[in-house]
Amino acid sequence: MFIVFEGIDGTGKTTQMKLLAEKLRQQGRQVVETFEPTAGVYGKKLRQLFRRRDELSLQDELDLFIADRREHVATLISPGIAAGHDVLCDRYYLSTAAYQGARGGDVAAIIDLNRAFAPEPDLFVILETPVTVGRTRISAIRGEEPNDFEQADYLERVGEIFRQLRRDNIIRINAAADINTVHRRIMAVVDNFLMDS
C-alpha cells in the first residue's frame, strides 16, 4: 500500500502515521515511513523557509517542492513500492497544491504537474480539524510559536482547499478527537481497503 497523510498543520499526521506503521508491522508487513519536505538537499532549503517564507517567489517555492518530490520519488517512494513494502508518507502533492494554492497558485495545475511523475497513492487520508485546535496542538506539543506556514488566516485558506478536493482515493477523518479514537478510525479505513484489495 501507498498511503499519504494530509491536512493542515496540527491535525496529527505524524502521530497517526507512526501509529499505523506500528500496527502494520505487528501484522508482519514491511513498512517504510517517510515525510515531505524531506531531509534531502531541497527539503532542507524548504525547511529554512518556515521562518522566512517571503524570501522566495511562489514559483521558486513550487520549484523547490517539485525538485524535492522528484528526488523523494526516485530514491525512496518508487523503490519502496517496487519492493512490495507499505509506504506511508506524511504530506505529498495535495499538501503542495493546498498550501501553494492558498498563496495564489493554481491548484489543478499543481496537481497535474505532480501527477506527471509522482506515483498515485492508494489512499489519501486527509485529517480534518479546526484551525484553532491545530494551532493549539502546535504550541502545546512543539512548545513553539506557529511558523510562516501556520498562521491562522493562511491555514483557513489551506483547509478550504483541502475540503474542496474530490478524488476517489481521498478518505476524510475527523481528527479533532483524541489520538486513539482517530487511530481506530484510520485502522477501520485501512482494514476495509485491505479486505477489498
Image (cartoon, grey):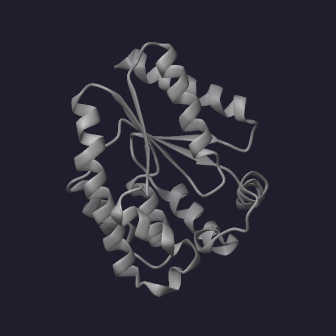
Residue 38: image x %, image y %?
Answer: 41, 55
In the figure, residue 105 lies in which quadrant?
bottom left
> Can residue 191 be seen by looking at this rendering?
no
* 154 lies above or below 34: below
Q: Quadrant of the N terminus?
A: top left
Residue 81 lies left or right of residue 26; in this view the side is left
* 115 lies above or below 45: above
Q: Quadrant of the C terminus?
A: top left
In-front residue for pair 17/96: 17
In the figure, residue 135 lies in which quadrant?
bottom right
Total residue callouts: 0
Q: Residue at x 43, y 65 (%)?
A: 44
* 76 lies above or below 40: above
Residue 84: image x %, image y %?
Answer: 27, 25
Q: Residue at x 58, y 45 (%)?
A: 13
Residue 98 lies left or right of residue 143; in this view the side is left
Residue 113: image x %, image y %?
Answer: 26, 63
Residue 103 lies left or right of residue 109; in this view the side is right
* 9 lies above or below 171: below
Residue 167: image x %, image y %?
Answer: 39, 47
In-front residue for pair 136/94: 136
In the figure, residue 71 lies in which quadrant?
bottom left
Q: Residue at x 33, y 61 (%)?
A: 68
> Can residue 6 be seen by looking at this rendering?
yes
Q: Residue at x 75, y 39 (%)?
A: 177
